[in-house]
Amino acid sequence: MTNFKKQSLLIGAVLCLSFLAWGVPAAQAQSGPGGKVARALNLTDDQKAQLKPLLSNARQQLLSIRNDSTLTLDQKRQKVQVLRAQFRTELDQILSPAQQQELTALRAKFRQQRMAQQQLNQQPQAQ
């Protein structure tokens, strides 16, 4: 894989971190606290208000990681993993136990959908 492709993959991963931390694709999440995931979790206005700066901060940190030319691709991946773990920890402090369970179920659902899509993409095309 070329360095450009690796960087492109990293950039995509970095920009979607907030949605990955939720465990869902960006298209499903629909722009942060007001998106489908927030509605599925039935977030209160207070929770949405708490989540907004959390997401903003995560995005800023991701962009700084992405733009840090002193880091190797592996170092960037490690920093993103740490940031993702921190985000999830902070998110769990905002969510109720029932919402955490629902989020876990949503993550599992989207993971299954992603795996099914990957399997479809790997099947040879009939000619």
Image (spheres, helix red, strand yellow):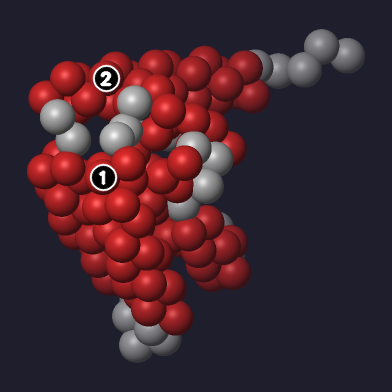
Which residue extends farthest right? 127
- Amino acid, disc 1: Asp
Mark 2 residue crowding within 10 angstroms, few (<14) / some (14–19) / many (20+): some
* 59 or 125: nearer the viewer: 59
* Residue 88 visible here: no
Residue lying at 15% horizontally and 50% vertically, measured from the top left: 90
Q: Position of residue 100 (x, y in %)?
A: 19, 27
**Which residue is painted at 32% across and 41% down in the image?**
45
Q: Where on the picture, by quarter, is residue 104?
A: top left
Give percent across and percent down for residue 82: 19, 59
Query: Going 62% across and 17% down the picture, which residue do you hit?
Result: 120
Which corner quadrant holds the C terminus? top right
For marks 1 and 2, the one nearer the N-term is: 1
Q: Is residue 86 left or right of residue 11?
A: left
Residue pictured at 49% horizontal, 25% vertical: 114
Above or below, comparing residue 7 to residue 106 in the picture: below
Q: Residues within 10 Å of mark 1 (few under 14, many from 20)?
A: few
Mark 1 → mark 2, Cα distance in angstroms: 18 Å
- Say which residue label 1 marks: 46
